[in-house]
Image (cartoon, rainbow, N blue to C red):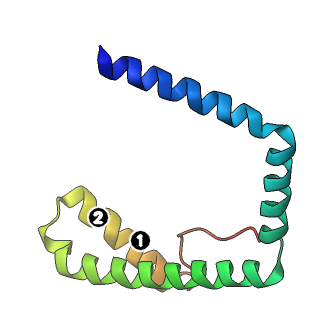
Amino acid sequence: MRYRLTFVVGIAVGYVLGTRAGRERYEQLKKSARRIAQNPAVRNTAETAAQQGRVYAGKAYHAVSEKVGDRMPDSVAHRVRTLRERNTNGSAEDDWGTSNT
């Protein structure tokens, strides 16, 4: 019971302190975050990181599927083979998703 009471008091204190910051501070933080997100340097860095992540994920996918492919259940192995064939026969694009920036 003591822990529940402490938790409820903590929530109440957090709520009161949060509301004191008010809407103005929230709007300031939101505006700053939007400005940072729209900065071309930040967007380029995020896109580069996303592309590198897709490259590394693709490499890891192929390395794991080659080593584990024959030890997987048939349904999973079939899916891996299908994806591998699609990537070699189709476009070189991955299916990890793209950025909308």
Q: Is residue 42 left or right of residue 80?
A: right
Mark seen at residue 83: 1
The quarter of the image holding the C terminus is bottom right
Mark seen at residue 49: none
Which residue is painted at 50% across and 79% down in the image? Answer: 53
Residue ranking furthest to the top: 1
Q: Is residue 68 left or right of residue 12?
A: left
Q: Which amino acid does the dot numbered 2 rest on?
A: His
Name above or below for residue 77 compared with residue 31. Answer: below
Mark seen at residue 78: 2
Residue ranking furthest to the left: 71
Which residue is painted at 81% across and 53% down in the image? Answer: 30
Q: Quadrant of residue 20?
A: top right
Q: Quadrant of residue 4?
A: top left
Characterize the local packing of mark 2: few (<14), some (14-19) or many (20 or more) Cα atoms within 10 angstroms: few
Residue 93 percent coordinates (x, y)? 58, 81
Name above or below for residue 30 compared with residue 46. Answer: above
The quarter of the image holding the N terminus is top left
Q: Is residue 52 left or right of residue 84?
A: right
Residue situated in front as seen by the camera: 55 or 90:
55
Examine the rendering and report whether any part of residue 91 can be seen: no
Name above or below for residue 56 compared with residue 16. Answer: below
Q: Earlier in the sequence, mark 1 or mark 2?
A: 2
Q: Secondary structure at mark 2?
A: helix
The CA span between labels 1 and 2 is 9 Å
Examine the rendering and report whether any part of residue 10 can be seen: yes
Q: Is residue 24 left or right of residue 49?
A: right
Q: Which amino acid does the dot numbered 1 rest on?
A: Leu
Which residue is painted at 67% across and 80% down in the image? Answer: 47
